[in-house]
Image (cartoon, rainbow, N blue to C red):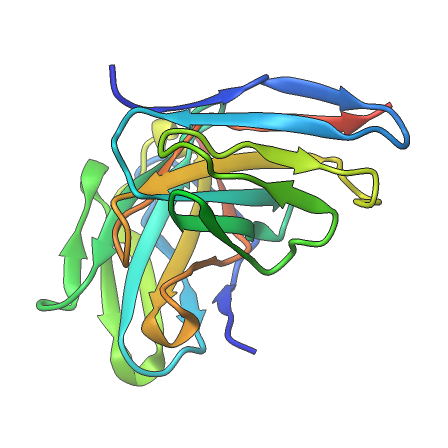
Amino acid sequence: DGGITQSPKYLFRKEGQNVTLSCEQNLNHDAMYWYRQDPGQGLRLIYYSQIVNDFQKGDIAEGYSVSREKKESFPLTVTSAQKNPTAFYLCASSPGGANIQYFGAGTRLSVL
Amino acid sequence: AQSVSQHNHHVILSEAASLELGCNYSYGGTVNLFWYVQYPGQHLQLLLKYFSGDPLVKGIKGFEAEFIKSKFSFNLRKPSVQWSDTAEYFCAVNAKAAGNKLTFGGGTRVLVKP
């Protein structure tokens, strides 16, 4: 069954802690994306990757880091430098270019 | 700055009423336009898209949208809504001028009362 899998569904972070959100896709898509969703603000792009071993900052990259060591995986780390991490995080993938993006079910991150 | 604006944050209407959600963008040049929908507890999914050709595009579940280039708009419409259309709707724009990144509007929460 093809798709994008995000885990965990819910995540709690303590002060000063780094946490990593997982995103895996089996659609053989080249491009992958991370968005943050806050009420009334839509989705804002954190990082994106057009190809393995390469990624670019989006509009709100500060306090986040990513890696793209495999085509199917694009994990996002929320570092302690991100002072307001509570949000819904969505991962997406696309064949690349201006194509349609397909989304995972999301991870809801809260701060303890 | 380049942006996408959705005019209504919340819309409440009764079943069988008509729905129109506004979307304006500020990009110049070539754009691809999308409407995504997020039903309660479900994935964000594509409702419809415009890449080129006929500016009136039809999507799933009876939705349609019209691209008016002169107005930088891509409004979403449905003639008669159902309770199951309760969801959050997002307009998104992919512009070559912005490096082909997808920029989303703030979303509109639609509540359809039975």
Q: Nearer the viewer, residue A111 or A67?
A: A67
Going by the image, does B63 lie left or right of A42? Answer: left
Please identify the residue farthest to the right as the structure is shown.
Answer: A15
Camera sees residue A38:
no
Q: Quadrant of the N terminus of chain A?
A: top left
Q: Which residue lies at the image location 42% right of the left edge and 72% below the top edge?
A: B98
Q: Position of residue B109 (x, y in %)?
A: 52, 43
Going by the image, does B71 lie left or right of A95? Answer: right
Number of callouts in the render?
0
Going by the image, does A110 lie left or right of A23? Answer: right
Q: Position of residue B20 (x, y in %)?
A: 36, 56
Q: Nearer the viewer, residue B110 or A23?
A: A23
From what the image shows, is residue B30 above or below residue A53? below
Q: Nearer the viewer, residue B86 or B67?
A: B67
- Residue B70: quadrant of the picture: bottom left
From what the image shows, is residue B87 above or below residue B96? above
Camera sees residue A30:
yes
Q: Which residue lies at the image location 77% right of the left edge and 30% below the top edge?
A: A18
Please identify the residue farthest to the left as the structure is shown.
Answer: B53
Please identify the residue farthest to the top as the structure is shown.
Answer: A1
Q: Quadrant of the C terminus of chain A?
A: top right
From what the image shows, is residue B54 above or below residue A46? below
Q: Position of residue A53 (x, y in %)?
A: 44, 44
Q: Which residue lies at the image location 58% right of the left edge and 41% below the top edge?
A: A66
Q: Position of residue B32 (x, y in %)?
A: 27, 64
- Residue B91: quadrant of the picture: bottom left
Q: Nearer the viewer, residue A56 or B34?
A: A56
